[in-house]
Amino acid sequence: MNEFLVTGGLLGMSIILILGIIILLISILATARRIKHQEYSLLDEKLMLSIKSLGGIACLTGLFFQTLGLYLAFQAIQAAADISSIIVMKGVFVSFYSTFFGLGVFLVSMIIWYILKVTAGNKAK
């Protein structure tokens, strides 16, 4: 896991990981409110919206860092006179790490959001 985070770009992958952890913490809070049978309130709506929003931000962060990585890689390729196609393809492959990670966090956040939305049922106004 550490190699995946470092290879994919420590800054971008760390941001996505932190967003994923925040999503999980918010989900635990929302689930705890459901278990305690607290009345559905504005706080629940904000929690639900933040799960979806943070998932989208994680997805866009992954795409941003992939684009940035490809841009920097193409600059390095342009500066080098002769470069192996294998090295280029490995760089392109690695650039997808942040996108996959961001999409994974987004997918998990949407699943959590859907489950919490369904369990809200008729409690929502």
Image (cartoon, rainbow, N blue to C red):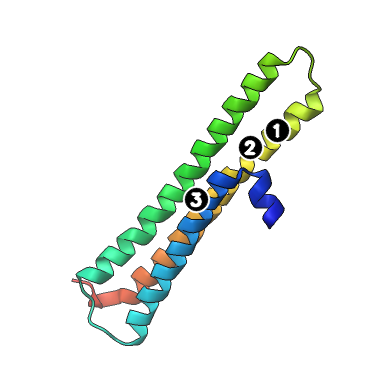
Locate residue 73 relative to residue 39 in the image: left or right: right
**Mark 3 — residue?**
15
- C-alpha span from label 1 to label 2: 6 Å
Label 1 with label 2: CB-CB less than 8 Å: yes
**Label 1 element class:** helix
- C-alpha span from label 3 to label 1: 21 Å
Query: What amino acid type is highlighted by mark number 3?
Result: Ile
**Where is the C terminus found, in terms of image quarters?**
bottom left
Query: What amino acid type is highlighted by mark number 1?
Result: Gly
Circle 1 residues within 10 Å: few <14, some 14–19, many ≥20: some
Circle 2 residues within 10 Å: few <14, some 14–19, many ≥20: many
Query: What amino acid type is highlighted by mark number 2?
Result: Ser
Label 2 with label 3: CB-CB less than 8 Å: no
**Label 2 element class:** helix
**Where is the N terminus found, in terms of image quarters?**
bottom right
- C-alpha span from label 2 to label 3: 16 Å
Counting from the top left corner in percent of width and height, residue 64 is at: 49, 37
Q: Is residue 85 visible?
A: yes
Circle 3 residues within 10 Å: few <14, some 14–19, many ≥20: some
**Mark 2 — residue?**
95
Counting from the top left corner in percent of width and height, residue 58 is at: 46, 50
Mark toward the start of the polypeptide (3 vs 1): 3
Locate residue 14 relative to residue 2 in the image: left or right: left
Residue farthest bottom in this picture = 36
Locate residue 44 relative to residue 55 in the image: left or right: left
Counting from the top left corner in percent of width and height, residue 105 is at: 51, 56
Locate residue 31 relative to residue 85 in the image: left or right: left
Mark toward the start of the polypeptide (2 vs 3): 3
